[in-house]
Image (cartoon, rainbow, N blue to C red):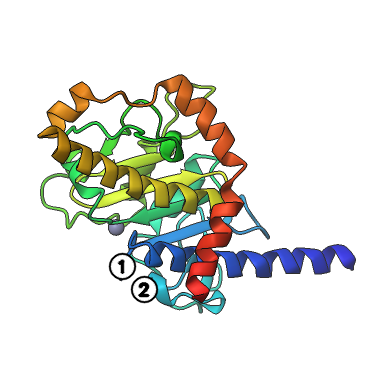
Amino acid sequence: MAQTDSNADYYTQCLQDLSLASRILAHHGIVDGFGHVSCRDPRSPKDHYLLSRNLAPALVKPEDIVAWRIADAEPVDPNSPRGFLERCIHSEIYRQFEDVEAVVHFHSPDIIPFGLMPIPFRAVFHMASFLGAESPPIFDIGDAFGPGTDMLIRNTAHGAALAATFAPSAPSSPTRALVLMRGHGATLTATSLKLGIFRAVYTQINARILTSLSALAGGAQNAVQGARFLTSEECEASAATNAGQVTRAWDVWCGELEN
Ligand SMILES: [Zn+2]
């Protein structure tokens, strides 16, 4: 009985955290009326994930969260409210990568330029060290589905193609953290919901710093040639340190929502 109670409490906390996560993303301008965040459903993590019904992220409350099937992105309860058009982003990433616990998809204008041309999107400071010393992959929906799409991830085929872009760089590596999406935005993965939000916030800040660096250096090319970005060893060490600080950031961002 006690175990059941504790499982129920954990599920309730998940709904609360997911609604907070959604609102933190909106508060930071990472999402606007669009964009979404999900996590695996703790009641059935291999088969289901949790994601809001079709709603602007700033408005999401715990009661708006719906359980979806990883197999086909359909609702576990057929009477659930309508979901996001792009929920196959989430289902296909969970289906392909067992180590992913949370997914964030966003259209932040700070990120868009880096998906349009190969301007290196490397970690410029320690808080974004999870990005690593190599630029993330760029997913171009036109490569697989031709020049006439509306750019959205509308079905499992689109989702599977995007998800495949997250494949680890080596067999023993974790799933890639970030994929830029040409003319659309970005999607990122994490091993926890709070880490996913941490990564989203610092991805956006990293983009802003790179943009200001390019302006100061007289262009992106000058910035890339002249800047001393974090090395892969620095990224690895710093990301390990940051992993222990995620709750501290989460707590302050939740506090900002209350204010
Ligand atoms: Zn989108």
Q: Provide the secondary structure element on which disc 1 rests.
A: loop
Say which label, 2 or 1, has the lower sequence index. Answer: 1
Residue 50 is labelled as none
Residue 99 at x, y percent in the picture: 57, 39
x 45%, y 64%: residue: 24
Extreme residue toward the front, this view: 216
Residue 14 at x, y percent in the picture: 62, 64
For the N terminus, give its image quadrant: bottom right
x 19%, y 33%: residue: 119
x 40%, y 47%: residue: 202
* Location of residue 82 by image quarter: bottom left
User: Does residue 190 appear anywhere in the picture?
Assistant: yes
Ligand 1, by image quadrant, is bottom left
Query: Do callouts 2 and 1 mark residues in contact (Cβ within 8 Å)?
Result: yes
- The reply, left or right, for residue 13 in relation to residue 37 is right
User: Does residue 50 appear anywhere in the picture?
Assistant: no
Q: Residues within 10 Å of mark 2 (few under 14, many from 20)?
A: some
Residue designated by label 2: 56
Q: Provide the secondary structure element on which disc 2 rests.
A: loop
On screen, 112 above or below 76?
above
- The reply, left or right, for residue 44 in relation to residue 231 is right
* Count of marks placed on residues: 2
Mark pair 2, 1: CA separation? 7 Å
On screen, 87 above or below 179?
below
Residue 32 is labelled as 1
